[in-house]
Image (cartoon, rainbow, N blue to C red):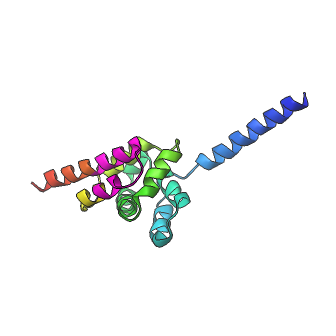
Amino acid sequence: MKKLIVVLVSILLMNTSFAQMTTCDKCDIRYVTFIEKHFNSLNEVMVERFLCGQDYSCAMNPKFFEISSKTMYAILIKNPALVISCLEKYSYLNKNCIYDIIKNPANTYDFSTIKATILALPDTSRIKRQVANCVMLAGRKKAAAKK
């Protein structure tokens, strides 16, 4: 009986701590500006919080979308491994939404250089290839829009 209680309590504690880890404020512009202010000291926790805040409902807030898109690309330029690591590690992130944000940037960048930097990472995951493909698609869309 004691073993059963210990197991149940352990499961409850694990579920509670997991639920706390996965909660985040969607579309919170304050966190995006926090990332901008602390950009030179980015770490996985900060990037995970930023990515966790991305949601399709954020498209209703053009200011958030623009700042968030710029921040996403700034991170991809500075340290794409952090984005890829978070996408691989945290299954609760809205990957499709994040991929769509990458595919539809607010600004124009040197997409071929960003893609090459991503592909040069030692990681061989499908997620790395997906992020690189999203950057390539973004470049194609921006190039087509100029015509």
Residue 86 x/y as whole percent: 49, 51
Residue 100 lies, with reference to residue 121, above or below; the image says above
| Residue at (48% x, 51% y) in the render | 85
State whether the magenta stretch is mostly helix, strand or loop: helix
Magenta run includes residue 63: no
Q: Residue furthest left?
A: 147
Residue 104 x/y as whole percent: 29, 51
Magenta run includes residue 129: yes
Quadrant location of the N terminus?
top right
Residue 100 x/y as whole percent: 34, 46
| Residue at (59% x, 48% y) in the render | 23
| Residue at (79% x, 33% y) in the render | 8
Task: State the image quarter where residue 142 is shown.
Answer: bottom left
- From the viewer's perspective, tell me whether residue 6 is left or right of residue 78: right
- From the viewer's perspective, tell me whether residue 33 is left or right of residue 8: left
Quadrant location of the C terminus?
bottom left
Residue 85 lies, with reference to residue 1, above or below; the image says below
Residue 21 x/y as whole percent: 62, 49
- The front one of 142 and 85 is 85
Q: Residue furthest front?
A: 122
Q: Residue furthest right?
A: 2
| Residue at (75% x, 38% y) in the render | 12
- From the viewer's perspective, tell me whether residue 22 is left or right of residue 12: left
User: Over which residues does the magenta segment extend?
Assistant: 116-135
